[in-house]
Each structure stands twice: as structure tokens, then as C-alpha cells.
Amino acid sequence: MFDATGFRQSLQRFFPRSTFQRHDKRVHVLVLCRGITALGFSVVFPFLSIYFHNVMKIPMTTIGTVFLMGILSGAVAELVGGELADRFGRKIVMVSALAMRACVFLLISLAVLRGVGFVPIAGLIVLSSFSRGLFEPAALAMISDVTTPEKRQEAFAFLRIGINLGWAVGPAMGGFLASFSYAFLFAVSGIVSFIGVVILFLALKEPTGDVRSEKVGLRDIASVVHDKLFLSYNLISILIFVVASQLIMVFSVYAVEWVGISKLQLGYLYTANGLVVVLLQFPCVKLVERFRMSRVLAFGSLLYAVGYFSTSFAAGFTLLFVAIVVVTLGEILTGPASIALVANVAPANRYGRYMGVFGLFSSLGFSIGPFLGGLVMDLSGGNRFIVWGVIGIVGVAASVGFLLWGRRLPSGVDRPTAEIPLGVITAPDESARGPGEG
């Protein structure tokens, strides 16, 4: 017999509604908006590499170069967006950046419809990443503006869940729409993004008071070189972001063209990725909170390596599904721990600077990843064990690196505290999705 009370209690563990309702309404608006923008982004992005490679016959190395340029442009835009948000306000920057991105998606739809060629579309993709970079620091700054330190970790965690709810719906939708028309796919993405613009414009209020944040620039990057512990952490983190970035470009082409699943089935895989994050993010954080975070990062990196390498054996949808669940568990573990360690290592008066520098290093990893993956695919001669073996080795190297790095940390620094935001990576969402998480 169905136990309704037990079901509601179980649901509450995954979606703590009362906790969410206690937050400022602007947190609610941003979680909703990020879910919608992630939906719009994920409708099209998993299928972009397939369109370039399968329809336009573009080499994977060239596609990886476009992704690299997009993520680098997003990293630069994050610095610009933070400065603009400080000078002109959070809301105007977010509305303008999201409107720009919606227009870009509609222009891509028109370009695909008219068959204008690869270069103009690639340029628009880079511009889309730039607009995402403008949006992100303003959104994170507003969350910080309207939450107290003890509630901030919850707010950021809810933001991550909102993003992944969008990712749970978008790819399945995109897989269905891609079977009809890629132009229509981009048009839907643009329309959904414009819905987010309307919600932000009508429902979001600018924070009052002094909301200026700490600047992050080239001199700030140079200053952290003197912090050898933090610098080594960032260098190791590049490895795991290289691995994480394979989820979109390389994995999508591999799954459809090498394994032979349909685009609809690919959409289901990305939906599974989003749903696993939504369902298990809070439980997993609670489960591992008693462990040293460097060890959690090491284990998460190993899960990434195992998950991706196991796709080498896939002959169809089932094993790819199992692999994507393992990869997602790696994402769940590495996401919260990576940002929490930055907060613990950073001096109290340089928190913003360290977060900004970490974001730039993570963007570097996400930039290198698609290029490396595409290059290996082109040079592998069709040998799937070479492709995922290389990616697996990078994941194992990250795991060993985090274990060795963790030995240099005092136990207190290597454990989560009550005021550390969970699950927020300023590198692309939405967090680990390629040139812009959504």
C-alpha cells in the first residue's frame, strides 16, 4: 500500500521546500531564471558538436578550437561582467546579458536556416559564451547580496539544483527537436532565453545599499603566485576540469557517431545527468561531509576517470547510461568540495579574489578539454580505447594530485565549515557543461 506520508518525508530530504521558502524572494527568482536559462541552453548545446561534425563535416579539432575560444571569451567576460555589475547594478547586467544571448541564439537559428557556413556560426557561439560570462558574476553577486553567511550555502546549492532541473528537461526536448530541424532547435533556445529575460525584468529587484565586490584582474592573478599552496591547487584543478569538459562535445559525438545511439537517446543521457544531480546533490554532500575534502576530490576524480573510460566498452545505450551516472557522481562530489576548499584556503580579506582566480583557472581547464578531446579523436584512428584512455589517465592524475596536495593541509582547513557555499563553480554551470553551463 502506498504510504503518502513516507513519500512526502522522502521527498523533503531531496527538496527541502521549507528551507527554500525562508530565503529572499530574489533567490527564488534567480533559481527559477537559472533553471529556465539552463533549459534553453541545454536544448541545443549537447547537439551542437553533432551538427558541426555530422552535418557540416567539420573536424573535431576545429570544433574543439571553437569551444576553447568560447570558454576563454566567457572567462574574460566574467571579469568585465563583475565590474559592470558593481558600477551599474546586478539587474541591468543580467537582463542585458541574457537578452544578448537570446538574440544570439535566434541569429544562429537564422544562420543555420540560410546555410551561411561554419565561421559565422562559430563566431556567434563565441559571442554566446561571452554573454554568459557577463551574466554569471552579477547573478552570484546578487545571491551574496541578499543572503546572510549562514544561509548562503543553501542558496547556492538551490541555484545548482535549479540549473540541473533545466538540464534534466532540456536535452530530452532537444533530442526530439533535433530530429526535425537544427534551425528550429536554436529558435526554441532563443525563445526560452527571452522568457528568462522577462522574468528577470519584471520580478527581480535590485539590492539596496553598498554591494561593491572585490575586483579581480591580472595583478590579482599574479599576486596568488606567491601562495604556492593555492597555486598548486589550481594547477591540479585544471586536470579535473579538462576531464569534466568532455561531457558535451566529445561525449555527444562519440555516443551518436561511434556507438550509434540516436539523438533522442543522447538527450535522455543528459537528462539522466541532470536528474542525478538534482536527486543526490544534498544526500551526497551530507554523506561525505565527515571526510577530508581533498580525499573527496580525489575519489570524485577517480569516478570521472572510471565513468569515461567505461564508455570504451559501450555497444549501445545501456552501458552509456551506467557510465553517465558514474560520471555524474564524480561531478556531484567534486563540485562542492572544489569551491569549499578555495574558501578555506583563502585569507579572510581576499575571499573574492581567490574565488575569481579559481574561476579563471577552471575556465582554462574547460578551454583545454574540448580541444584535447577533439584532437585525440581525430588522431586516434577510430580507436575508442585511446580516446577514453587518455581522458581516464588525466582523471587519475588529478586524483593522485589531490591526494598528495591534501597531505600539505591541516585537517581543519581540509574539512567543510558552516559558512562554505556548496555546489557553486563559476566555471561554465552551469557549472561543468562546456562554454557556458546555461
Image: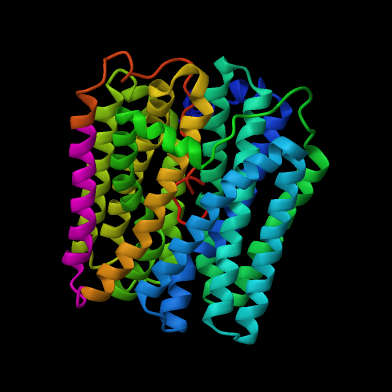
Toward the viewer: 105 or 74? Answer: 74
Residue 180: in sight, yes or no? no
Toward the viewer: 393 or 168? Answer: 393
Toward the viewer: 324 or 106? Answer: 106
Give the answer, above or below, for where 261 lies relative to 21: below
Horizontal side of 421 relative to 410 (left or right) equals right
Residue 384 lies in the magenta stretch: yes
Q: Residue at x 40, y 37 (%)?
A: 335
Q: Residue at x 68, y 56 (%)?
A: 193
Residue 67: in sight, yes or no? yes
Kindly give the residue lying farthest to the right in the view shown: 202
Residue 311 on image: x %, y %: 24, 60
Residue 342 on image: x %, y %: 41, 28
Which part of the image, by quadrant, shows the N terminus?
top left
Residue 161 on image: x %, y %: 52, 38
Q: Main secondary structure of the magenta part?
A: helix
Give the answer, above or below, for where 245 lies relative to 212: below
Magenta stretch in the rendered image: 380-403
Give the answer, above or below, for where 286 lies relative to 176: above
Residue 367 on image: x %, y %: 41, 56
Give the answer, above or below, for where 21 lies relative to 175: above
Among the 4 quarters of the image, the one containing residue 148: top right
So how many labels did they put on this image?
Answer: 0
Q: Residue at x 38, y 23 (%)?
A: 345
Among the 4 quarters of the image, the one containing residue 128: bottom right
Q: Residue at x 60, y 85 (%)?
A: 116
Among the 4 quarters of the image, the one containing residue 109: bottom right
Residue 355 lies in the magenta stretch: no
Horizontal side of 38 relative to 104 (left or right) equals left
Instruction: Indicate how the structure is coloured in the image.
Output: rainbow
